[in-house]
Image (cartoon, rainbow, N blue to C red):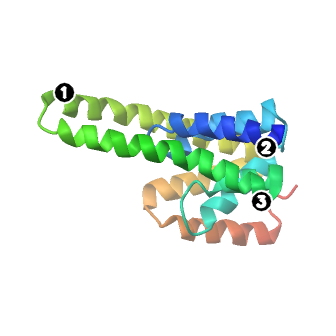
Amino acid sequence: MTPVLVSLAIIFTQLSLLAFGGGNTILPEMQRQVVEVHQWMSAQEFSAMFALAQAAPGPNMMVVTLVGWHVAGWPGVLVTTLAKFGPSSIVTGLALHAWERFKDKPWRVKVQAGLIPMTVGLVAASAALITLATAHEWMLAVITAVVAIAGFRLRIHPLWLLAAGALVGLTGIGQG
């Protein structure tokens, strides 16, 4: 295994075990590792891969596979995908078994209630990171804000928002 593949395996295994509250909660650390620490891509390339992964059918963490492809081709795809999804799948299976075992315990409700704000905070941090990486012009910041507000207030399916963003992109607005 090459040093790059070893680095990918270590990074994505760690991220797999830290993905608490969903895969998107590890986006800030994933971006920091691949953009700042290892400089395998720019922040804009990372954001573009994230957007592509979100638009594609399948798991919402397809960005992991795309990062592996970008960094090391097919071996990178295999290493990042196994490293990201393998350990967390094992831990999830074990945790679900334990969680079911303690289903009647009063502390379980309190633990669940405490996990919600932490997960919301991690997802919000991921959204802020992606926004900062992509909205590098004021018009893009306005478009991002409008889409975020529309998504929150109107509860429109995200694919409609993506389609609207694609149409705006075709006009050249925000292409600076």
Residue drawn at (82%, 51%), measured in percent from left and top?
A: 72
Where does residue 8 sit, x and y in percent of width and height?
A: 72, 41
- Label 1: element kind: helix
112 or 124: which is nearer to us? 112
Q: CA distance from mark 2 to mark 3?
A: 13 Å
Q: In the rendered view, would you say 176 is above or below 124?
A: below
Whether residues under marks 2 and 3 lie with C-beta atoms below 8 angstroms apart, the answer is no
Q: CA distance from mark 1 to mark 2?
A: 45 Å
Q: Nearer the viewer, mark 2 or mark 3?
A: 2
- The residue mark sitting in front, 1 or 2, is 2
Q: Which residue is mark 1?
A: 107
Query: Which of marks 1 and 3 precedes in the sequence?
Result: 3
In depth, the one of 47 and 96 nearer the eye is 96
Q: Which residue lies under the disc numbered 2?
A: 1
Q: Quadrant of the N terminus?
A: top right
Q: Which residue is mark 3?
A: 74
Quadrant the C terminus occupies: bottom right
